[in-house]
Image: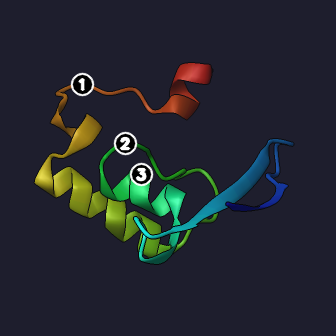
Amino acid sequence: MFPSHGAAPEGRITGSVVAEGKETSGREDVGRALICLGLAWQDQRGPSSARLRSLEQKARREEVGLWQQASLTPPWAWRE
């Protein structure tokens, strides 16, 4: 795994993790994989790639992972 990181405007540490191995058939962004499986939200409060938004929308349409639930609270709303 090769972490990369930075700082979000509110001081949180942000980053991404890339996994390598025979199971991933090369390098795979773990965050993107989690979003595709419906196991993570893409943070809509800050800048994010159109690709991440697209992956989340697809997971929502297909109702996979957490998108199977009727009522959800985003993590950033839960923290407030």
User: Which image quarter holds the C terminus?
Assistant: top right
Q: In the rendered structure, which amino acid carries the disc numbered 1?
A: Ser
* Residue 46 image point, x, y percent: 64, 56
Residue furthest to the bottom in view is 26
The crowding category of the residue bearing disc 2, from other C-alpha atoms within 10 Å (few below 14, some 14 to 19, many at least 20), is some
Identify residue for label 1: 71
Q: Residue at x 17, y 27 (%)?
A: 70
Q: Residue 68's image quarter?
A: top left
| Earlier residue among tags 1 and 2 | 2
Q: CA distance from mark 2 to mark 3?
A: 5 Å
Point out the residue furthest to the left here: 62
Q: Residue at x 44, y 46 (%)?
A: 41
2 and 3 marks in contact (CB < 8 Å)? yes
Residue position for label 3: 34
Residue at x 86%, y 42% (from the top left corner): 11
Q: Residue 58: horizontal and vertical position, in percent?
A: 23, 63
Q: Nearer the viewer, mark 1 or mark 2?
A: 2
Q: Residue at x 44, y 70 (%)?
A: 22
Tell which of 32 and 22 is nearer to you: 22
Residue beneath label 2, please?
A: 39
Q: Residue 26: x, y in percent?
A: 49, 79
| SS category of the residue bearing label 1 | loop
> Distance from label 1 to label 2 (Cα)?
15 Å
The quadrant of the image that shows the N terminus is: bottom right
Mark 3 packing: few (<14 Cα in 10 Å), some, or many (20+)?
A: some
Q: Is residue 15 left or right of residue 45?
A: right
Determine the secondary structure under disc 3.
helix
Question: Decide: marks 1, 2 in contact (CB < 8 A)?
Answer: no
Element class at badge 2: loop
Q: In the rendered view, would you say 35 is above or below 19?
A: above
